[in-house]
Image: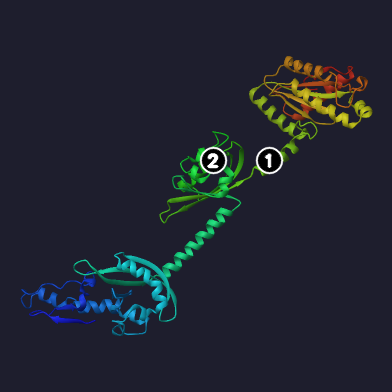
Amino acid sequence: MQCVARKRPGSGAYSGHWHNGLRPIFAGLIPVSANVSHVSEGSGLEKMAESSITDAQMLQIVSRHVGATISVYDRDLKFRFVSHGFARWFGMEPEQIVGRSLAECYGEHNFTRYRPYIERALNGETVAYEREVRDPSGFDGWRTVSLVPWRDDDGNIVGVVNCALSVHELKTTTEALRAANQRLTSHMDNSPLAVIELDAKLNITHWSPRAEKMFGWEFESSADMSLDHLLGTTDVEDDSLRQAFMRLQSGEESSNRVETRNVRKNSVVIHCEWFNSALTDDHGQVVSIMSLVQDVSERVQMVEQMRELAEHDSLTGLLNRSAFRLQMERGLRRARNTQELVALLFIDLDGFKQVNDTLGHGVGDDVLREVARRITRSVRAADIVARIGGDEFVVLLETPVTSGIAEEVSSRILALLSEPYAFDGLTDAGAMPQVGASIGVALYTPQESHVDSLFKRADAAMYDAKRAGKGCVRYAGPGE
C-alpha cells in the first residue's frame, strides 16, 4: 500500500491520496483540510492551513502512535493495511505484511479459530470478542477485538477493518471481582445464618436459601411483599426491627443488633437475632442494608426453661420461695402506692407426714401436685400461689382485698383440700390419702414496710390454727 502526499497549488497544506480505496476507512479519524484556494498569503487562515495535519501525517499518527493494533484486509483475506503496532506482533515492518494472507501470517490453526468471526463481519455484522494472546514480549494477556465491515462508496462490503486493544488489566480485575462475588455469594448461600439484603428503601434485593428455609418464603414470591408482611411479628406493638433499620437509614448507627419474634409462612413463631449493617456511598448516604439473621428459638426456649427452673418448684410447677418473695415485694410496693390492702395466706398441710410414712413418697408427691392444682383453682386469676417448703404453700391476695375476700378464698381452699384424693394404683378406699390444711392469714397495711414481718405474722397465725385443732383459719393481729 502506498500513501502519496501532494501539496495543493497555492497552499502550504498537503492532501493525502489513498491508493486502493482505503481513504474512507480513516475518514472518521482524519480531519479534512480547509479549503484554502481563495485564501490570501499571510492571512490567519493561510497560517491555519499550513499548520493543519495532512492526511499523510494523520496516517502516520494512526499507524505508529495509536495504542490499538489496526489492520485492514479484503474479501480475499489479504492484508491491505496494517499499523506499526500490528506489524510488531509478527516481528515485521508493515510493508512486509501488506499483501500477505491472514492464513499465512496467523498460521492455519489460529486462522481457523478466527475465521467464523471474519465471516460474520464479511456478511455485514459488526463483531466484538475477547481472546487471550501472547504479545511479542511473551506475555499472555487479554485483548478485545473489533471487526467492522469495510464498505466502498456504493455500500458494498469489500473487506474488514480489524482493531484490537489490550484489556488485560480490565479483564483480570473483572475476573477477580467476579470470582470474589462468586465466593461471597457461595458463602452467603451456604451460611448457617439467613442473609437478607435490602436497598435504601428497605426493598429486599437478596434473600438467601437459608432465609427461604427460615421464614418459609421463596425470594420470587416475596419480591413484592412488604418487609412487615414477609417477616411478620407476634406483637403489633413490637417495632424493634423497623426501628433498628431506621437508625441505619438515618445514619444514627452503622450497625446494630436486635432480637425479635417473627412468624413464618406456616404461622409458626420463631425467635430471631438480627445483625444489621449499612453500606454507604462516598457522600455518606445509605445504599443498602445487609442483615445476618439467626434462629435463636432453641436458645430462647432453653433460657426460658432455665428461668422456669430457677423460679418454679420442680414438683408442682408453682413459684418457689425466692420467686414468690420478689412477687411479694412488688405487691407491697403497689399497695403502698395505692394505699390498699394485701393479704398473705400461709397454708400447712395436715396429715401429710402420715401419707409419706404409710403410702410412700411417690404417693406423697402425687398429693402435693394435686394440692397445688386445688389451691390454684381456689384463688382468683390475679392472685399468686407458691410452694415454699415440703408441705407449705402460700398465697398472695392483691387488689381488691378485704378481710371478707381473704376469708372466702381461705374457705374454698380448706373445702377443696379436704376432699378425697384418688390415684391410680390405690383401689382400697381405706388406703386413699386423707389430708387437710391449717391456714394463717396476715393482712398488710400500707404502714408496714417489710416482707419478712408479713411472713412471720402469717406463719404465727397458721400455728394458731394448728393449735386450734387443725383444718381451720386464723388471722394475725396487727403488729404480731
Q: Is residue 373 shown left or right of residue 260?
A: right
Residue farthest toward the front in the current orientation of the protein: 76
Foreground disc of the pair 1, 2 = 2
The amino acid marked with disc number 1 is Gln
Q: Neighbour class for label 1 at 10 Å: few (<14), some, many (≥20)?
A: few
**Mark 1 or mark 2: whose residue is earlier in sequence:** 2
Residue farthest toward the right in the current orientation of the protein: 358
Residue 271 picture quarter: top right
Q: Secondary structure at mark 2?
A: helix
Quick check: marks 1 and 2 in contact, CB under 8 Å?
no
Q: Classify the position of the C terminus by image quarter.
A: top right
> x and y percent of residue 232 in the render?
54, 38
The amino acid marked with disc number 2 is Leu
> x and y percent of residue 335 in the render?
67, 24
Residue 456 visible at all? no
Q: Is residue 445 shown left or right of residue 279?
A: right
Residue 240 picture quarter: top right
Residue 339 visible at all? yes
Q: Classify the position of the N terminus by image quarter.
A: bottom left
Q: Which mark is residue 85?
A: none
From the viewer's perspective, is residue 39 above or below residue 433? below
From the viewer's perspective, is residue 129 above or below residue 402? below
Report the residue marked by disc 1: 301
> x and y percent of residue 399 in the render?
67, 21
Picture residue at 73% right of the left edge, 40% below the top: 306
Q: Is residue 410 shown left or right of residue 232?
A: right
Q: Which mark is residue 231?
A: 2
Q: CA distance from mark 1 to mark 2?
A: 20 Å
Picture residue at 49% right of the left edge, 42% below the top: 221
Q: Secondary structure at mark 1?
A: helix
Residue 440 picture quarter: top right
Q: Neighbour class for label 2 at 10 Å: few (<14), some, many (≥20)?
A: some
